Amino acid sequence: MAIVFPVTLPDLVTIHHATGVANVDTYVHVFAGAFPTGDRKAVPAGPTAAEREASPYHASVEVIDADGTIVRSVLHTVNGYTFTAIAAAHTAQRVLAGETRPGFQTPVGLFGRGFAETIATTTIVDL
């Protein structure tokens, strides 16, 4: 059984800062049992390498313009834990190489729309 519910994902909150889009809703689709229940102290620190390999991340976006035009894209990438670690390393390398601007920046705001696709096997497909 799968469930879908609205959720605020921290990385998606930054969409407004990178695009200026003010009205952003996010949802998550999970299978029953995907979230741990019970004693939180018994939950492991994170998935194993094998579990991460078996659980890639997919995200879709739908943008509706003021005139009603709809644009959709889908992102396919490695597991979120793996993506975050690689993205942090790529970001540090680029900042140390001088790619900086003062103040708060999102990765896409600083490095451009193609940043996600520099991480592992990430692809973005415009539909």
Image (tube, rainbow, N blue to C red):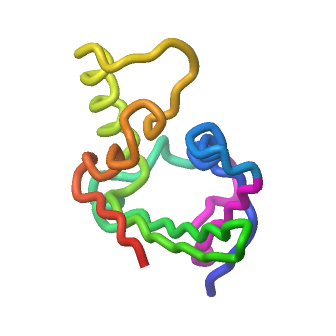
Task: Write down the quadrant of residue 10 in the picture.
Answer: top right
Magenta stretch: helix, strand or loop mostly: loop
Q: In this picture, is 74 found above or below 109?
A: below
Q: Which span is picked out in magenta?
A: 23-41
Q: How many numbered marks have been drawn onto this rendered protein structure?
A: 0
At a point 40% along the width and 72% down the height, the residue shown is 126
* Residue 67 in sight: yes
Quadrant of the rendering where the N terminus is positioned: bottom right
Q: Residue furthest toward the front? A: 67
In the rendered image, residue 3, in percent from the top left (x then y), is placed at 68, 79
Position of 93 with respect to 19 (left or right) is: left
At a point 49% along the width and 46% down the height, the residue shown is 44
At a point 49% along the width and 66% down the height, the residue shown is 59
Task: Write down the quadrant of residue 23 in the picture.
Answer: bottom right
Task: Write down the quadrant of residue 11 in the picture.
Answer: top right
* Residue 82 in sight: no
At a point 44% along the width and 40% down the height, the residue shown is 108
Q: In this picture, is 90 found above or below 74?
A: above
Quadrant of the rendering where the C terminus is positioned: bottom left
Q: Residue furthest toward the bottom? A: 1
In the rendered image, residue 20, in percent from the top left (x then y), is placed at 65, 44
Viewer-proximal residue among 78 and 101:
101
In the rendered image, residue 39, in percent from the top left (x then y), is placed at 69, 50
Q: In this picture, is 48 found above or below 123?
A: above
Viewer-proximal residue among 107 and 34:
107
The answer to if 30 sits in the magenta stretch is yes
